[in-house]
Image (cartoon, rainbow, N blue to C red):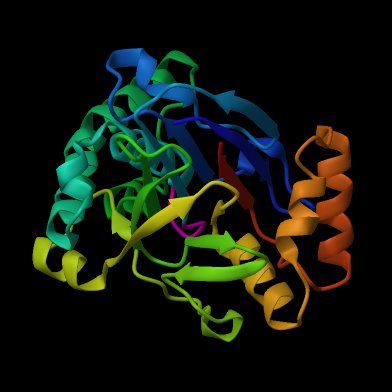
Amino acid sequence: MRAHVTVLALHKGGGEPHEYEDAAWVGSSTATGEARSIMPPPGPTCRRGGVGRVATLRAAVADGASSSLLARRWAQLLVREAGAAPSGLLRTEAGFADVLNRAADRWPDHMKEYTRLRELRGKPITWFERPGLERGAHATLLVAHLAAHRWQPGRGTWSAVALGDSCLFHVRNDAVRVAMPVEAAEDFGNTPPLAASSGQDRDLAASHAALARGTWLLGDRFYLATDAMAAWFLRQSENGRKPWDLLRALDYATPREWTTWAERERASGELPNDDVTLVRIEPR
């Protein structure tokens, strides 16, 4: 399949770029090694590109919980693990829970490397940081998988699985065909289910996961968004606007133009002041 992909990311207003705690990944699940990743996890910036001649396309977004230390590192690890996971694990809630725990199994090595780097920089971990590090990091995660039809061009299948309130929107003919796992702007809360770097109970994580699947046609668009952008998208749609048209206009925005747009939406109260991440996929 072919697709046009745009990734937009921005840190909280009033914050610094290094404080951005979301993550995004776009790649092909059928490739191997480094070839899997078409777009690596971005910092707070704009990335775009064309994807051509891949059997499948996978994208993931994660929102690190600011209340936990090293949330950005955990979010990045989650999207990379989701990108590398066998497709079968993303077709069931239980398989998705296994993906989360695979990431958690890798976390101790990340902590060892983080500790080593801190010591090399002459800034070893302090006593007051240790309780937070022992509690671990937390994040939401959404993974979408698109595949082309084997013999019918311009159509295919898609599936998505999520834990927490990062969302997928499937748009066709100027209408939201699917919104998951949150379907209304008023349904966003402060305590979504989160993936924990310390690991999670498989059955409990599976019970909190949301799974959806469908078919896509040429001209359809998919949006993966962390909670702030997802809430904006739903609110715009519920008020009779077409957020997909506004976002299409940002497809070729410069980082400065993207930042200006986000700051204007935040100032108006339309966009919550939080880290913002959006992946736009248009199959072609």
Task: Name which quarter of the figure residue 45 lies in.
Answer: top right
Residue 167 visible, this angle: yes
Left or right of 135: which side holds 119? right
Please report the residue visible at 45 percent of the width from the left and 53 percent of the height from the top: 216
> How many marks overall?
0
- Residue 199 seen: no
Q: Is residue 239 above or below residue 110?
A: below
43 displayed left or right of 116: right
Q: Nearer the viewer, residue 237 or 25?
A: 237
Q: Residue at x 34, y 42 (%)?
A: 78
**Considering the image in quadrants, where does the C terminus appear?**
top right
Residue furthest toward the bottom?
186
Horizontal and vertical percent for residue 9? 66, 43
Rendering quarter of residue 191:
bottom left
Q: Main secondary structure of the magenta part?
A: loop
Residue 221 in the image: state x and y as whole percent: 58, 52
Instruction: Identify the residue shown where x is 12% and y is 59%.
Output: 94
Magenta-colored stretch includes residue 282: no
Give percent across and percent down for residue 108: 22, 34
280 versus 35 height, above or below: below
Quarter that holds the N terminus: top left
Q: Residue at x 50, y 76 (%)?
A: 190
* Outermost residue, front side: 152
Which region of the structure is painted magenta? 65-69
On the image, the x and y values in percent for residue 76 come to 42, 37
The front one of 187 and 251 is 251
